[in-house]
Image: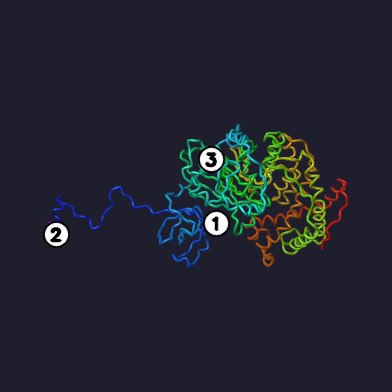
Amino acid sequence: QSLWLKLLAVAAAGGFCFPSPLPTRRAGRQRPMAQMWEVVGGADKGGILVRDGKATASTQLPERLSTGALVEELELVNERLRYKLVTGTGPTEGWVSIKLPGKELLVKTDKHPEPAAPTGPIVVCSSLEEWLPSPHPATERCNDEWSKDCPGWPGISMEQFQENYMNNEVGERFGMKFPHNQEQLTSKQFGAEWMTKAFHASKVLPADNRVKRIVSTKQLGGGGAADKALVVVEYEKPSPDLHEKLFMKFPYPMEGARRSDRMNSSVMLQQDCMEVDALRLLEAYMPFRVTKYYFSDISSKTSNFIVLTEFVNYGDPRKPLKDFAPFEVEPPYEKFLDDEQWGDRTWEYYKEMTRATALMSGHFKAGKFGDPDELAKYFPRSGYAQAGMDDKTFQVKMKMGAEFISQVAHKLFPPDVITPAAMEEWKRTLNLANAYTGEFGYIGSMDERYQVLMHGNMNADNTYWARDGEGKLLIGVIDWGGLGISPFHQKLWWCNYAAEFHFFEEHLDELLQFWCMTYQEAGGPEVDVAFVKRFFCIAAINQCIGLLGAIPQIYRVVSKKVWPEALDRNFPKLKEHFLTRMYVQGFVLICTMIHRWQLGKMLDDAIKEYSLPAKPLTELA
C-alpha cells in the first residue's frame, strides 16, 4: 500500500502517467459508421418480404420493405440481414434475405439519407412570366426533336408482346437501351451513368455536367395506366434549372394483380407511345404550364417504355389553402371528389381546365403545334366504332347492368332514376345508342372543324394548381397517355365525366359555350354549341354501355353480399378504391343524366334529324 501511495505521489508531481484502465479513442477519430444497404429487388411486387426472425420459416410481416429503401445493418448472418429502416417504407426493423438465386435484393451502398425537407413553402417560381415563360426554354430542344426522323408507332400484336415484353431493346427515340422498372434503373447496367447519357442525348443536361448518383427511388400509387415512381438524383453541378426530384412512369409488371392492366395498356389501348412523345415534342408549345421533360423512349418490339419528367411537389393537404404562398402548388386532387375537395369553388377549377383544353385545340387549328399530318404520325387520328355490341353480348351485359343499378347498388342512385319506368327508358336509350353506334360515330367525326389535338383526360388528378400574388388560379397539366387527334366533343366528355350532376345542371351549358368561344379566339373555327352538347351526351351514353363490362370488377372489390352495407358513396371500399369509385359514380352520373335530361328523346330527335333509317333493337328482358 505504501508503495502504491509513493507511485501516486510521483504521478501527481508529473513524473509519469498511468495508462488508462480502458483504451481511449485517438483525438478526432470517429466510431465506424454502420453499413448501409439499399433495396434493389422487389420493384415488380411493391418491395421485398420481411420476417420477424432470422429463419426463413419465421413469421412474415404484413408490410414489405420498399424498393429503393435505405437500411442500416444491425446483424448479418450468411445471407440474412437484420436491419433498421432509415428511408423508404416498410417495417422499422426485421430480417430480410439479401439475395435470391441469380438475383440481388439488397446491395451495400455508401448512400446516406436525404437532407430533411425544408419546412417553409416550396414555390415553383416567383412570377407569371416564370410560370409560363415565353419564349419557352425548351424551344430549341423541341425543334431538335422534330428534326429527327423517328418512326411512328407501328402497333404490337399480343403474340409479339408476350414473346418480347421481358427484354430490354433499343428505344426508337434515342437509339439506346433503357430501364423499364425501378430495379433496372438503379442497377449496374443503368444507374447514374445511364441517366447521364440519357439526359445528354435529350439535351436537358449540359455536356459538362453529369448525374452523380441516384439517391433513392420510391414507388408511387394512383392512376390505372402505368407504374409510377419518385426518383431522387444528385448532379455533379447542381443548378436551379435541374430538378433533383424526378417523376418516372413505366409499364406495369406482367405478373400478379397488374398483369391484366399491363396487357390492356400495352396491347389493347397502345397509348404509351403518345405519353413518350407528348413532352418530347410539344413541351415548348403548350399554352399552359407542363412538367419539365427529361427523357422518354419506347420499344415497338416489347412495348416497354420510360418517361422521366419533373416531379410535382404538391402541397400538404392538412394546410389551409388560405395559408399557401403565391406559386406554391396546392395539394393533389382526385377524380369524383369535387364536392369534398372543391365545394363551392368547383366552377373556378373546371373553368381553367376548360380554358386549357380549348386553347390547346385552337392552337392546333392555328398551326402552332406544326403540320397536322406530321403531328398525326405521333398522335394519330382516332377512328370510330363501326357497330355496337352483338345482340347476345348486349343482352347479357344489360341484364347484369339493370340488376346492379336497380337492386344491388340502388341506395346510391336517386330514387326517381331507378323507378320501373325510368329503368325501362334507360334500357331503351342504351339500346338505341348501341344500335346506331356507327351512324352517330360517323356524324360526330365527319366535320373537320371538330377534329383537334387535345388532352383527352384533363381531370382533377391530371392537373396541379397554384395561385399568383393576386390570387388568380393557375393550372399545370400532367399525364399525356392517349394524346391524339379526334372530335373534341367526345374528349370534352372524358375531361368532365368525374363531375357531380348538380354541377352539370348549373354549369354545363356555360362550360360548353365558354369552350367553343375560347376555341375560336385561340384560332379555331366557329362551331355549333348545340351539336357539341348533343355529342357530349352521346359520349356519356356510350360510356355507360362500356361500364356494363366493369360490373364483374366492381363485384371483386365489393361483393353482392357486402353491397347492403354501402349506404352511400362514402362506403370505404368505394371511396378508397379509385377504379371502383370511378365505375360506380360513373353509373350514377350518367343514369341521372339519361333520366332527368331525357336523353332517349334526344336520340330519337337525332335519328329523325339525320334521316337515319329505322333499325331493329336488341330484345331485352
Q: Which residue is mark 3?
A: 199
Looking at the image, residue 14 sits to the left or right of residue 601; the answer is left
Q: Residues within 10 Å of mark 2 (few under 14, many from 20)?
A: few
Q: How much space separates mark 3 and mark 2, taking CA atoms?
A: 74 Å
State the residue in front, 558 or 36. Answer: 36
Q: According to the image, label 1 marks what residue?
A: 46
The label number, if any, that marks residue 604 in the structure image: none
Q: How far across and down, in percent of the image, does residue 321 sit?
A: 59, 46
Q: Which residues are magenta?
A: 1-6
- As helix, strand or loop, the secondary structure at mark 3 comes to helix
Pointers 3 and 2 in contact (CB under 8 A)?
no
- Is label 1 or label 3 in front? 3
Give me the residue at 71% from left, 42% from top.
485
- Please state which of the two labelled residues, at mark 1 or mark 2, is closer to the viewer: 1
Classify 600 as above or below 511: below
Whether label 1 touches label 2, CB < 8 Å: no
Q: Position of residue 33 (x, y in %)?
A: 37, 52
Q: Is residue 2 magenta?
A: yes
- Please tell me how crowded label 3 is: few (under 14), some (14-19), or many (20+) other residues with Cα within 10 Å: many
* Quadrant of the snapshot with the C terminus: bottom right
Is residue 181 something that shows in the picture? yes
Q: Residue visible at 68% across and 42% down? A: 379
Q: Secondary structure at mark 1?
A: loop
Tell me residue 142's x, y (percent). 61, 36
According to the picture, the residue beneath numbered tag 2 turns out to be 4
Q: Quadrant of residue 324?
A: top right
